[in-house]
Amino acid sequence: MSTQEQAVVHVQRDDLRTRMGMWLFLFTELLLFGGLFFAYSVYRYLYASDFALAGKEMHVIIGAMNTAILLTSSMTMALSITAMERGNKRLSILYQLTTITFGLLFLVNKYIEWSAEISAGNYPGSTELAAKSHGQIIFYGLYYVMTGLHALHVIVGMTIIAVMCAFTIKDVITKDNYVKLEAAGLYWHLVDIIWIFLFPLFYLIN
Amino acid sequence: MSSEAVSVPLDSHSSYLDYTGKYKGLRAWIFSTDHKRIGILYLVALLSWFAIGVTLGFLIRLELFTPGKTIVDPQAYNSFFTLHGVIMLFLFVIPGLPAVFGNFFLPIMLGAKDVAFPRLNLLSWYLYMIGSLLVLLSIVLPGGAPDTGWTFYIPYSVRTSTNMIFALTAVFILGFSSILTGLNFLTTIHRMRAPGMGWFKMPLFAWSLYATGWIQILATPIIGITLLLVIFERVFHVGIFDPGLGGDPIMFQHMFWIYSHPAVYIMAVPAMGVISEILPVFAKRTIFGYKFIAFSSLAIAVFGSLVWAHHMFAVGMSDTGEFIFSLLTFLVAIPSAIKVFNWTATLYKGSITLDPPMLYALAAIFLFSIGGLSGIIQGTLSVDIQITDTAFIVGHIHYVVFGITGVGIFAALHYWLPKMIGRMYNHKVAKVAFWIFFVGFNILYFPMFVMGWLGMPRRYYDYLPQYTTYHQISTVGSWIMITGLIIMFYNLIKSVKYGEKVDAKAVWVYGETLEWTVPTPPPHENFDEIPAITDGPYEYKFNDEPILEEEES
């Protein structure tokens, strides 16, 4: 890089800086979940048959629906960025709102699923679960912690996109300056990717 | 500060102490996104918590003056050592150098006007304050202060009825603050260096913050999730760590140390950076082995992340696991030793002046060498079984953490505080304080090695009479050291208001890094014009040292 080019960096906006900050933040998120994936793999190894047994009771249909919902929402998120890139503000807002709606749908499904589990007595501290084997108790412990933490990320992601929506309406995010929207998109894809790993671990391997 | 500002025109060229932006008084500080003001905010908070930590340490030593009860009952004693650890580690040494001096000087050293994300920077200060207040709340709220030790080991941290949730949440939030600082610095270093400042023209303090930044963002999330799991364990009984429900407490220890060992390097590496800054200035010599020092920071970051299980040699791991972790522990000594040898080589044939910053820097090298070598002893499997959980470990951690990081912070204070406030402290008093502190330090911590070797367990409230002498020497040492600390801080704090004014840009004459090219104290925007860098950071243009046999480069 020539010195002149670098000097310009200081007076102009530096999109790469924002992107880099976001990527670094995503690393930390991956490691946060990494700790949980680590715990999961150790206990899966220790209590393989119990995990398979507990996994059979998961609601695969709801899980599959949620996977589809999140994947689609990632697409609408990407579309909203492309729309902004091409200067179509209205379409971008529309896609952002769609993404938030998909997030909401995901949470509704999650609520239904958790309610079903809880009414069946499969929650930490319940007498029904206490009667089961150690492996099953840990399976449900991990299930609630990991999907709960993920759901929290979905909520955070929706909030961020809602803020981006307001920014787009106020023209803070424009055709020439949409790096904030891009960063929000990166975060949303992370939320999606983590779910893609959670889904097989809890619902499919049994 | 703003009252002094009457005669100066308040534009972006005036000193950052005068430039208040749109706010006045306290609000001009707590809403400022200026990296220099945030650095000062951290400094004030940090030193306040340090005072509390020292007081607790003083009480621990006082309690151990005689076997059995001396001043407090066992429960209070347990809380003392827990909070002493939590406050000193999470509130003082981990944020210490990056948050205060990194914030203040990193952008200036790189030739930038601020960090990459100034608002995020302020947010991390708020998170730090929230975390700190939660720690303090855990002491005063009914339920009792945490009593698990700073390591929060399972299963006791799930069973105890004290205010664990506060302490755990606090450390979680503090971790978040630390991550944001690391992220900010990494981006700043990557994207905001002045034109011409290639990677190998960066000051070594910036290199050390770069390595630290990576450890902060890669290791801290792990302790975040670990402590979150302990909270869930306490509140919801999820069973992941609780052996009663099938969980594995050893897993907690692994996950705890995966962060907490690299955290040692979050503390130590920036201090090594400070030493690398100070030595050339007071030896008037170009730093020896610049690239080796720079890369050894990264090497420490890499190796340091792979040695966590040496804290757990006594838990019954597989032999293979123990051998590997022991070997890696020996390897991490290599980059640390590279630094020490390069520092020594920098001093060789230098024209050394023993100003206060230099004294502290040299003391840090000396104490770190003792601490580091005792670490090698502990890394040896057979020996470690003997000294696990003894006072030896306590001696080691204090020589390393206090020895290099704590003393490194003092060195940085004496080196940079005049630049930050534009006033110089009294050198004579600073030197007297140093020697009292240094002597007290060794009297306080060295007996711990001896009594630990003889079998004195750590964290015990009571002890057998044969250890009495060592404990009493150690306690007397704590009085001497604290006397030194009081004189030192009295001198520094007094200088903020009454110290002799310093106007020279280069406060220490031989400082060659960029912070010595801006006015003292630095103006709001640091630079009128972003400097163009042509030379390395320590190329002495007016070197009056004897010519060496080194070849010209």
Image (spheres, rainbow, N blue to C red):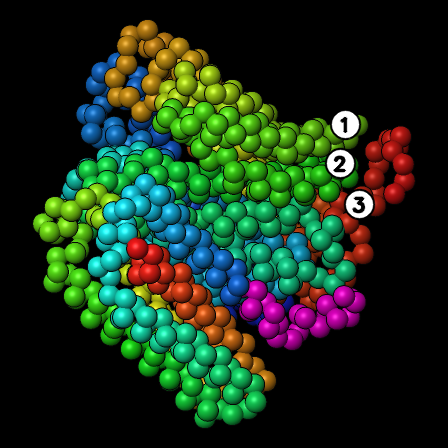
Q: Chain of mark 2?
A: B
Q: Vertically, is B97 above or below B76?
A: below
Q: Position of residue B236 (x, y in %)?
A: 19, 51
Of marks 1 and 3, which one's residue comes earlier in the chain? 1
Image quarter (top left, top right, bottom left or bottom right) of the C terminus of chain B = top right
Give the amino acid at mark 1. Answer: Tyr
Direction from residue B278 to residue B479 in the image, left or right: left
Residue plotted at (45% across, 79% down) = A75
Do discs 1 and 3 share a chain? Answer: yes
Residue plotted at (52% across, 38% down) = B306
Give the amino acid at mark 3. Answer: Glu
Range of residues picked out in magenta: A1-21
Contact between marks 2 and 1 (CB within 8 A): the answer is yes
**Is label 2 or label 3 in front?**
2
Q: Vertically, is B441 above or below B273?
A: above
Label 1 to label 3, Cα distance in Å? 16 Å
Direction from residue B15 to residue B551 in the image, left or right: right
Label 2 to label 1, Cα distance in Å? 9 Å
**Can you identify the residue that label 1 sits on?**
B348
Residue plotted at (64% across, 48% down) = B207
Contact between marks 1 and 3 (CB within 8 A): the answer is no
Q: Position of residue B188 (x, y in %)?
A: 60, 60
Q: Vertically, is A141 above or below B296?
A: below
Q: Quadrant of residue A206?
A: bottom left
The residue furthest left is A127
Q: Secondary structure at mark 1?
A: loop
**Can you identify the residue that label 2 sits on?**
B288
Q: Secondary structure at mark 3?
A: loop
Give the amino acid at mark 2. Answer: Phe
**Is label 2 or label 1 in front?**
2
Of marks 2 and 1, which one's residue comes earlier in the chain? 2
Residue plotted at (65% across, 75% down) = A12
